[in-house]
């Protein structure tokens, strides 16, 4: 089992250091975390960011890319990338947010990119599945 999966499996739901431990596991593997989905996913990613900052993590750099979409409902419209560290001086880990209103077969190229750029993926289309 890879270090990241071992770290994820070891996380109890009440553990306030979960974000840092996940990032430490990803850093050990040169991995990346990706979130993809609708506006609820955005809220989830921002919650992860808050938890990271609350437990001593840092956001070193951030970028946002707007993408044109031929059909507004489908595909990734915005990609945010945060380069973070679980604690000062620790290894950098990319955290990506691929915002999309709804997924369908026309979004497959976007999903291929998400798979290529990440080690752990959080998929959540809580409202628009």
Image: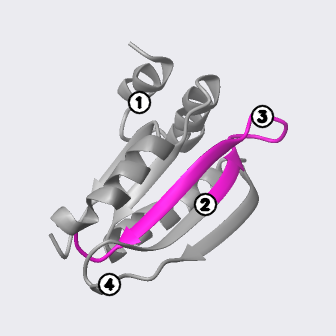
Q: Is residue 88 above or below residue 24?
A: below
Q: Are marks 2 and 3 in contact (CB under 8 Å)?
A: no
x, y percentage for residue 49? 57, 59
Q: Which residue is mark 3?
A: 90
Residue 10, by quadrant, is top left
Q: Residue furthest top?
A: 1
Whether the residues at callouts 2 and 1 have beta carbons within 8 Å, the answer is no
- The circle drawn on residue 70 is 4
Q: Mark 4 or mark 1, which is nearer to you? A: 4
Q: Residue shown at 48%/62% (left/top)?
A: 97
Q: CA–CA distance between discs 2 and 3?
A: 18 Å
Task: Compute the Cα span from label 4 to label 1.
Answer: 37 Å
Magenta highlight range: 82-103
Between disc 4 and disc 2, whose residue precedes? 4
| Quarter of the view holding residue 62 | bottom right
Secondary element at image label 4: loop
Q: Are marks 4 and 1 in contact (CB under 8 Å)?
A: no
Q: Nearer the N terminus, badge 3 or badge 1?
A: 1
- Find disc 2 in the rendering and name its residue: 81
Q: CA distance from mark 4 to mark 3?
A: 40 Å
Disc marking residue 8 = 1
């Amino acid at each position: 089992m890879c270090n990241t999966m071992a770290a994820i499996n070891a996380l109890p739901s009440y553990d306030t250091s979960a974000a840092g431990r996940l990032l430490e596991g990803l850093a050990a593997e040169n991995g990346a975390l990706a979130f993809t989905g609708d506006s609820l996913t955005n809220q989830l990613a921002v919650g992860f960011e808050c938890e990271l900052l609350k437990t001593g993590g840092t956001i070193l750099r951030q970028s946002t890319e707007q993408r044109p979409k031929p059909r507004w409902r489908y595909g990734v419209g915005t990609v945010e990338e945060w380069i973070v560290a679980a604690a000062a001086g620790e290894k950098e880990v990319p955290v990506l947010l691929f915002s999309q209103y709804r997924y369908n077969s026309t979004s497959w190229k976007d999903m291929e990119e998400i798979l290529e750029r990440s080690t752990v993926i959080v998929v959540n289309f809580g409202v628009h599945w």
